[in-house]
């Protein structure tokens, strides 16, 4: 084999390898777009609810959705401080009564800052789990329970104590152990592991 022939063969080999590499890269890119397109299409088909300026996807879990809400930054920070992220990412199902940032702002000044300190983790956990019901309860089911209870329904929380649900006009309310009431402002925000009902007041056990 002459030197010129060898050079030509090497060049041809390099061209072939480069072409194969480009084809492989293009195939991977195409698959990536196809997969992301499929996921996007699937999400577009889902019936979402807007909370805090973000769509809440029923295919995502409670934490995956909550972190995108601009109205629930305090709640998410508190859940992290209490070490409840893994729990609320779990199978569940859970019904979460989710106070907004404005709800937390109603508390006496310095309350949130105090609660998220490591030494107050037990108290914070108690308050947060008081906002969680074991099981998935839609607003319709809670309304039915209130009607069946002649105007009120007592429901046990994950924390162990009960909340009282009642209605006024077209609105659903929740009364805590201290006698304070919270109004459900956005109901039936479905999650893969439960449902969220947004409330305007922090509940206290």
Image (tube, rainbow, N blue to C red):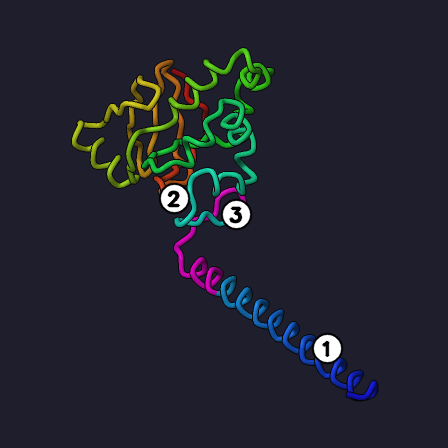
Which badge, 2 or 1, comes first in the chain's sequence? 1
Badge 2 crowding class, 10 Å Cα cut-off, few under 14, some 14 to 19, many 20 or more, is many
Residue that badge 3 annotates? 54
Residue that label 2 marks: 191
Quarter in which the N terminus is drawn: bottom right
- Residue 138: x, y in percent? 29, 40
Q: Is residue 20 above or below residue 35?
A: below
What is the number of the mark on residue 14?
A: 1
Structural distance between the alpha carbons of marks 3 and 1: 50 Å
Residue 97 as seen in the image, left or right of residue 13: left
The reply to whether discs 2 and 3 touch (Cβ–Cβ < 8 Å) is no
Mark 3 neighbour density, 10 Å: few (under 14) some (14–19) many (20 or more): some
Q: Quadrant of the C terminus?
A: top left
Q: Position of residue 182 (x, y in %)?
A: 40, 27
**Membership of 72 in magenta stretch:** no
Residue nearest the observer in this picture, 137 or 103? 137
**Vertical placement of 194 versus 108: above or below?**
below
Query: What segment is highlighted magenta in the picture?
Result: 38-53
Earlier in the chain: of badge 3 and badge 1, it is 1
Using the numbered discs, state the Cα–Cα distance from disc 2 to disc 1 in whole angstroms: 52 Å
Instruction: Evaluate whether residue 190 shows in this view.
Output: no
Which residue shows up at 43% across the image and 46% down it? 60
Q: Residues within 10 Å of mark 1 (few under 14, many from 20)?
A: few
The single residue placed furthest to the top in the displayed view is: 119
Q: Quadrant of residue 95?
A: top left
């Amino acid at each position: 084999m002459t030197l010129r022939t060898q050079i030509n063969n090497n060049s041809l080999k390099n061209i072939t390898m480069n072409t194969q590499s480009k084809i492989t890269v293009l195939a991977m890119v195409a698959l990536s777009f196809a997969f992301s397109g499929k996921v996007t299409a699937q999400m577009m088909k889902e019936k979402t609810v807007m909370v805090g300026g973000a769509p809440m996807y029923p295919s995502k879990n409670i934490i995956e959705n909550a972190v995108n809400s601009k109205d629930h930054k305090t709640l998410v920070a508190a859940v992290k401080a209490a070490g409840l992220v893994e729990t609320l990412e779990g199978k569940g199902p859970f019904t979460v009564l989710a106070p907004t940032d404005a709800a937390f702002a109603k508390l006496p000044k310095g309350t949130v800052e105090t609660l998220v300190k490591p030494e107050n983790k037990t108290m914070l956990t108690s308050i947060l789990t008081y906002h969680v019901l074991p099981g998935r309860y839609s607003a319709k089911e809670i309304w039915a329970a209130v009607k069946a209870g002649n105007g009120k329904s007592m429901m046990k929380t994950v924390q162990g104590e009960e909340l009282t649900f009642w209605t006024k006009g077209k609105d659903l309310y929740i009364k805590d152990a201290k006698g304070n009431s919270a109004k459900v402002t956005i109901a039936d925000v479905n999650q893969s592991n439960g449902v969220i009902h947004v409330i305007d007041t922090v509940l206290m056990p």
